[in-house]
Image (cartoon, grey):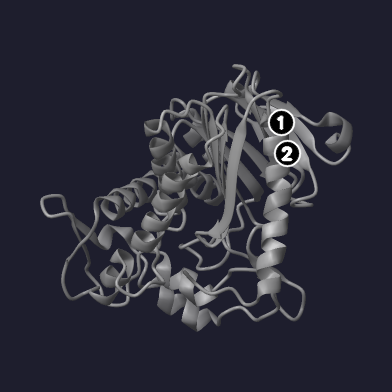
Amino acid sequence: MRDLKSKKQVAKLLGLAALGLMLITGLSACKNNDTVTRSDFLLDTFVSVTLYGESDEALLDKPFEKIEELNKTLNSFDTGSDLALIKENAGVQPVKVSDATYRIIEQGIKYSQLSGGYFDATAGPLIDLWGIHSPEVKEAPSPELIAEAQKKVDYQKIVLNPEDKSVYLTDPGMIINLGSVSKGYIADEVMAVIKAEGVNHAIVNLGGNVLVMGGKADGSDFGVGVEDPKNPGEGYLGVLSIKDGSIVTSGDYQRYFTDAAGKKYHHILDPFTGYPADSGLTQVTVVTAASIDGDGLTTTLFLLGLDKGMALVKSMPGVEAIFVTTDNQIVATPGLKDAFVFDETNYGKTFTFKFQE
């Protein structure tokens, strides 16, 4: 995993993430029921697993072991990992990978195709060039360097061999980046471990990825807050009620830097321009059954913008979304009418809200 710059930075990130978690656990807790929870800084983010109706903390061991295992396999920064080997052998030879890596790359290609290339699983050269991780002051890459990196981005040059589970990038310098789908896959795998242990009520929170199972121990829904993008960690636009499923949020406020003139550059990059996406959106929240789908879709929808993104969601059964635009509109899909409650009291003067028909 990439080293963070300082312990102070880690503490700040943990603190912000914990604020977001407080609403989730506060709304989810059920009186007179045992609860066990564990938190850590993994996957370059704040990670928490909470089991409801349970008192044995040892039940958390295997879920966290699974997170560690998959992090080593899927971390492109670790020498010898699948993604590092694929990068080293780009334009040279195929690389046999784990089932997990192969599955996630398949998912990356799926959303690359679905978005017409706005989401691109080979955007690694652009992502590495911009190096957008945590708030700082620095200058944007030169147009020449951006153009050079763009030449190495093309998901259609990923060659998969299902017989031996190998992956080949046809051109030297190409890099697969799975950051937009890997957390979702890991969340799904962790929940599978929890289910296998006989647990019936749980929340897995991997930063912006929340996966829930079984509702509260009393049978009622979990409540998950949709963050205020203008004041992350300080408030919630509304609450989603859900028993089972995934809620994933992506926004332009999560990772960014500003240049000396004060211009802000966020981390969701448009492969067609080489620059941070200017789609008219500031945040997208997606509700799906599987977290891996929510992960891929949040980035895809953010890049597509409101109109194209809404059209895509409506074409996909079992997918719901909440779009927040840069001009303070909140638009939710109609399937969330019984699940999402907008906080009109605190945000009605700042945002306009509607369910899209």
Identify the residue at horizontal 52%, vertical 36% (top origin). 56
User: Which kind of residue does numbered mark 1 sit on?
Assistant: Leu
Q: Give the residue type at disc 2.
A: Leu
Quadrant in which residue 139 is drawn: bottom right
Q: Which element type, helix, strand or loop, lies under badge 1?
A: helix
**In the rendering, at what x and y percent does residue 71 appear?**
41, 59
Q: Which residue is mark 1?
A: 27
Quarter of the image where one finds residue 168:
bottom left
Q: Position of residue 67 (x, y in %)?
A: 43, 52
Question: Label 2 belongs to which residue?
Answer: 23
Q: Is residue 18 above or below residue 140?
A: above
Quarter residue 350 falls in: top right
For label 2, count other residues whose C-alpha is less than 10 Å away and answer few (under 14), some (14-19) or many (20+): some
Vertically, is 326 above or below 121?
above
- The residue at 46%/62% (across/down) is 272
Q: Residue furthest left?
A: 163
Query: Quick check: can you spot residue 355?
Result: yes
Whether the residues at callouts 2 and 1 have beta carbons within 8 Å, the answer is yes
Viewer-side residue, 295 vs 263? 295
* Label 1 CA crowd tier, 10 Å (few <14, some 14–19, many 20+): some
